[in-house]
Amino acid sequence: MNPETTTVGDLGEDALIARLVAGWNPDGLVVTGTGDDCAVIRGSEDWLLLKTDALVEGVHFLPETEPERVGWKALCRGVSDIAAMAGWPGEALITIGLPAHRKVAWVEGVYRGVEKAAAAYEVALVGGETTASGPGNGVWISVALTGRVKPGAAILRSHGHPGDRILVTGFLGGSRHGKHLDFEPRLAEALWLAMHGPPTAMMDLSDGLAMDLPRLAKASGCGFRLHGSQVPCTPGCTLEQALGDGEDYELLLTLPPARVEPLRAAWAEAFPHLPLTVVGELTAPGSEEGLHGATGWEHFRSPEA
Amino acid sequence: MNPETTTVGDLGEDALIARLVAGWNPDGLVVTGTGDDCAVIRGSEDWLLLKTDALVEGVHFLPETEPERVGWKALCRGVSDIAAMAGWPGEALITIGLPAHRKVAWVEGVYRGVEKAAAAYEVALVGGETTASGPGNGVWISVALTGRVKPGAAILRSHGHPGDRILVTGFLGGSRHGKHLDFEPRLAEALWLAMHGPPTAMMDLSDGLAMDLPRLAKASGCGFRLHGSQVPCTPGCTLEQALGDGEDYELLLTLPPARVEPLRAAWAEAFPHLPLTVVGELTAPGSEEGLHGATGWEHFRSPEA
């Protein structure tokens, strides 16, 4: 690959990030830097979780989307990442790039959605910056979010083992029909799992099982075998949609086989309306079975990018 | 003002942010939320500083700007804000919105600049996200940065008193001739001031003295009197440029009169090549003297916005 001629779109997001951060060598306080849902920083009491996440008009929401739902989504995506580490959220800073001609009422609507999510998940809003979004540009929103986790208790993507069962919460697919704007991050569920499991590995499903399961398996040094017939598809969705639509914001986790059924029984009492489903197992590295060519959500290759 | 008809450009950045965050009511751990260079969060040992800052192509840098200098500037702006609180930087997360056709080499150049600044100021790079910047959009970069400060030792904008002298480090004006891309955040200087002063109030000069001095005075519940003839103008710059160009990234601070001359004498020994200049004093609220109509940098009113 020649970086002088290759474009960002040719390379794709994961390969680009891998190139960009290859030289990073964090110091001793950094438990996990890039490569997981959040960064984990060692502290004297609770450890610190750090996450940034951006929403772009025309990519993650449309100009006609109600601004309150845009604000809700902007903060909840970060909360979902904090949950996936088995942490709880702390403080958020909200940056919005805006064209000068945008109406004040629209921006206030976004903030109302952010405030609603902050109240729901006990996030303190501590900073807000606005900036011109640039010549010809639409709106973009970048959220920086902290979380806390008990020392050593963060659940990483990288500690799964061959033989561990792969599970997902909820139903997958069909997010584009509205769920991607109104979802509820699985914060209580993830903290419950950390207390009762805990999972060997966990992440949130933001880009679709077809893209996120290979990431978890790779981080754990494993392969995987997915049983497509077991995937809990949202009613009306095909398996392909369940694997590839993305923006499910459900939890993807792994558990040693002996712990699966006792945990599922306790789960059914705690969360009777939300399924916890076994969809496959981690295997020895080198084999990826069951995706049948399905692909997840790749920003730089989407038609709008 | 009718928010349904008023645009972001009509209202301006400070008034917009004031409206947006009016309902925020942070919890007991938040010492300072919006309205200062960083948010300050109480902790069990060192307190946490949080800052986000964004650079936009066409606003803060040009398409032809060398990418390394863009990356340097992106991280150093945040370091300057951490310095202004008398803190030291910790971890950074870098988010870049990119058009799909941008060359990989350009993005790698930005990261090299970020890495150079991280090495210079001992920042751990712990997260990187890339996303499509949106239909028709250029590049934008959002940096989230943590810092630490000893409990209670953060220097806020809000603790100046009438009679305090106003001082600035370095020379002001002319940043557009290159300094805005290559500046060195006044980190060592700010920590020295905190040990030897400490200033009653401090902030960094990002939007020009004409915009930032009224912000500091207002946060402290004071007015001010600026002595234009004492402002240390960059050689070749007029006073108007020194007040209004912005992006000086020097420190603006206040001190009780009796402490000014002893501190300046010690400063001259510690930093012989960087002036520390008295430019005016805080006064009783209600009077703002010496700006003579000069204005600072307002993003939404810039010709490019």
Image (spheres, coloured by chain):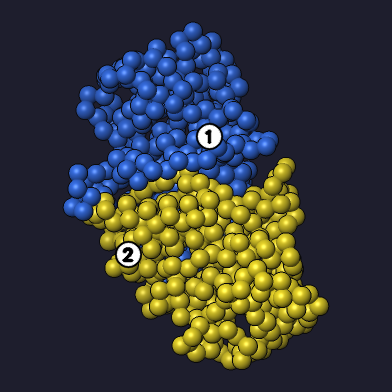
Chain colours: A yellow, B blue
In the rendered image, which residue does mark 2 sit on?
A66
Q: Amino acid at mark 2?
A: Glu
The vertical placement of B51 against A160, above or below, is: above
* Element carrying mark 2: loop
Residue at left offset 39%, top offset 12%: B163
Residue at mark 1: chain: B
Q: Position of residue B264 (x, y in %)?
A: 51, 15
The vertical placement of A138 against B15, above or below, is: below
In this orientation, which residue lies closer to the viewer: A293 or B21? B21
Could you say which quadrant of the image residue A252 lies in?
bottom right
The vertical placement of B56 against A203, above or below, is: above
- Residue B42 in view in this figure: yes
Q: Which mark is residue B31?
A: 1
Could you say which quadrant of the image residue B188 lies in?
top right
Q: Amino acid at mark 1?
A: Val
Count of marks placed on residues: 2
Q: Residues within 10 Å of mark 2 (few under 14, many from 20)?
A: some
